[in-house]
Image (cartoon, grey):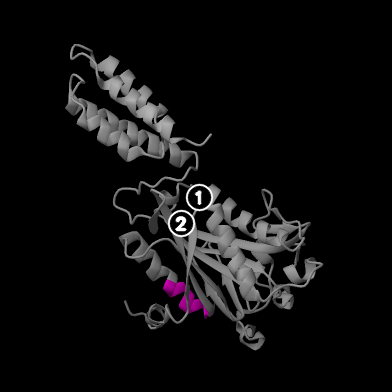
Amino acid sequence: MPTTAGTRQRRRARLAAGFAAPASRTRSHNSQILARIFYSYDKQDLSHTWSSASSINAVADIGWARRAVGRALRAHVLRRLLTGQQSGVGAAGSHPPAAEMGGGAARRVLEAWRLGVVKYGDALRLQERLVADRRAGRVPDLVLSLQHPPTYTLGKRRTDHNLLVPESSLAGLGAELYRTERGGDVTFHGPRQAVLYPILSLRDIGLGARRYVEGLESAMIEVASLYGVKARPGGACETGVWVGDRKIGAIGVRISSGFTCHGLAFNIDPDLGYFKHIVPCGIADKEVTSLRREAAVELPPDEVIHEQLVQSLATTFRFSDVKVKDDSECADMISSAATGQH
């Protein structure tokens, strides 16, 4: 139930009354008061809880009271993170989420870099640089939205026999090959495939690795549903997103010290013939499909589907807004990453 102004006033009155205790009260009793007040108070106004507790000197040991409320605050924030609730309190030593102030609360904004077609090697170097910048607090949470020229990539679980053609023959197919540190096996990237590479602090958004991957799956499933396609997450031995027994979206991520890179690839209408040269993601005897093949309606331009994926991702991870930057705004960063400059 939404908290009304009258309810807040009554809670503030109870807060003041709760601290108006004789100095003879024990710390144990004070601890009970603090815990009761803290967890009954408006959880959207943590700063008021702190200022009220630290300004009232009726508790036997106000220094202890400050420390107790501090512990309660940290416990509360941790509890919210563990339950996946949004928290406006950033982790110590990390860059706070991109935020704007509005309506009295911080609004977490996800930057979306719309880059068009980018060579895989350039995108890889750009991710490495952005992860370092995100870890150092120089950039906020962001997602790269792009496509690649025909490219095969091998993940950490790669096995050579899942690439069904000699590496030397790939140039004849007009494709490149990269060995990467992402999870997963072998996959293909190419034109008309939407690729998202989130560069996020999982600590700031309050997620573990498993829920993060589930969020990537959910974004693709939601976008597929917009076009009447019923997709599902893979089972225990089926990574990615599926339509029946046909794979429509792949996931391969890398998480280092709580910071993410790599991400998802959603098939809008790529040339599916390229998948015949690999065992996609190491899963044999399964087809690869696309949104174009599965949808019974006409699809909008690819750029629209890219934007829908970004918006779904932002909603899934509880960002309140998306700030779009196009390739012209990111040109210097892309250029320096491509040349290996910092």
Give the SS element for disc 1: helix
Q: In this rendered view, identify the residue nearer to me: 141 or 105.
A: 105
Range covered by the magenta-colored residues:
117-126
| Callout 1–callout 2 Cβ contact below 8 Å | yes
Residue at the (48%, 75%) spot, across then down = 123
Distance (Cα) linking label 1 and label 2: 8 Å
Quarter of the rendering occupied by the C terminus: bottom left
Quarter location, residue 299: bottom right
Task: Please give the residue where the numbered disc 1 appears in the rendered image.
Answer: 209
Q: Is residue 99 magenta?
A: no
Furthest residue to the bottom? 172
Q: Which mark is residue 313?
A: none
Q: Amino acid at mark 2?
A: Ile
Task: Please give the residue where the numbered disc 2 appears in the rendered image.
Answer: 255
Q: Is residue 247 above or below residue 84?
A: below
Tell me: 222 left or right of 7: right
Q: In this rendered view, identify the residue nearer to me: 331 or 165.
A: 331
Query: Is there any visible trace of residue 189 in the rendered image?
Result: no
The location of residue 115, given as percent across then percent down, is: 51, 77
Furthest residue to the front? 6
The location of residue 55, given as percent across then percent down, is: 20, 31
Residue at the (36%, 34%) spot, across then down = 75
Query: Is there any visible trace of residue 41 in the rendered image?
Result: yes
Q: Amino acid at mark 1?
A: Ala
